[in-house]
Amino acid sequence: MLYCFGGAVLSGIMLAEPPVAPLSNGTTVLLASLIWYLVFYCPLDLVYGCAALLPLRLVLSGMKEVTRTWKVLGGVTQAHSKYKDGLLVMIAIGWARGAGGGLISNFEQLVRGVWRPETNELLKMSYPTKVTLIGAVLFALQQTHYLPLHKHHLMLIYTTFIVVNKTRMMLTGSAASPFATIESAIYKTLFTGFSPYATLAVEVRKASASNGAGSALTKEACENRPANSTSGSLKTKNERQAGESCKKTD
């Protein structure tokens, strides 16, 4: 239930509303429970086998993306009704409503007794989380009249984009994000460049490499030294200790 209604639960917490409100509709809870049971415990895995067929998967994925649009728009509209000029609040609530299942996944893992912090969506966002965030930004800009588009036009454009792109990814079997090129360009433009410590870093790497080579040569020399070198080194050490004792006596 946390994963199915994660968006509504998370947005309710952020807006100081009862997080159990999504569970008040017994029909949706019963439907989610029935689907869960049929997918995992249907005899001969008939439901899962049918859902795994590519044509049906395409239809179900398209329906899910259409639902994502309504969830994002619902979250932005709900936040706009309480915070008229809260652009960031609208983006956050729309993002949480559309991608709440992924954002709340770490808490859901804790409930199941599993802890995998490397799967945190805020640290490494997946494609659904990214595309939901972009949708939340677009709908929030439209609600505050910064984006000169009608709501139904924006819904059509956004829904068409995510449905077509999801279908393309499923047909080609590619998991590459369509935003990879844009992300790389933004990263190289805003977050990289000449660093005043670049020369120092190069010198440190060179020094580390030379020290590593020197230690390797020393180790090789020690391994290949003659057997009588031990007695010579002991003799030298004894002479040095005798000289130090003489200095202390004087």
Image (spheres, rainbow, N blue to C red):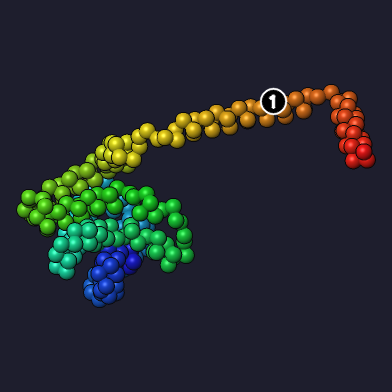
Residue 125 location (% of width, % of height):
34, 50
Residue 175 location (% of width, % of height):
32, 42
- Is the N terminus in the top left, top right, bottom left or bottom right quadrant? bottom left
Q: Is residue 196 left or right of residue 127?
A: right
Residue 85 location (% of width, % of height):
15, 62
Badge 1: residue crowd in 10 Å (few <14, some 14–19, many ≥20): few
Residue receiving disc 1: 217
User: Which residue is pictured at 58% across the width and 30% down the height?
Assistant: 207
Instruction: Residue 173: tell me if it is visible.
Output: no
Q: Is residue 151 left or right of residue 136?
A: left
Q: How many marks?
A: 1
Compared to residue 34, the image places residue 95 above or below, namely: above
Q: Quadrant of residue 181?
A: top left
Residue 221 location (% of width, % of height):
75, 25
User: Which residue is pictured at 72% across the width and 29% down the height?
Assistant: 219
Q: Quadrant of residue 145?
A: bottom left
User: Which residue is pictured at 52% across the width and 30% down the height?
Assistant: 203
User: Which residue is pictured at 17% across the width and 45% down the height?
Assistant: 161
Q: Is residue 9 left or right of residue 236?
A: left
Q: Quadrant of residue 166?
A: top left
Q: Amino acid at mark 1?
A: Leu
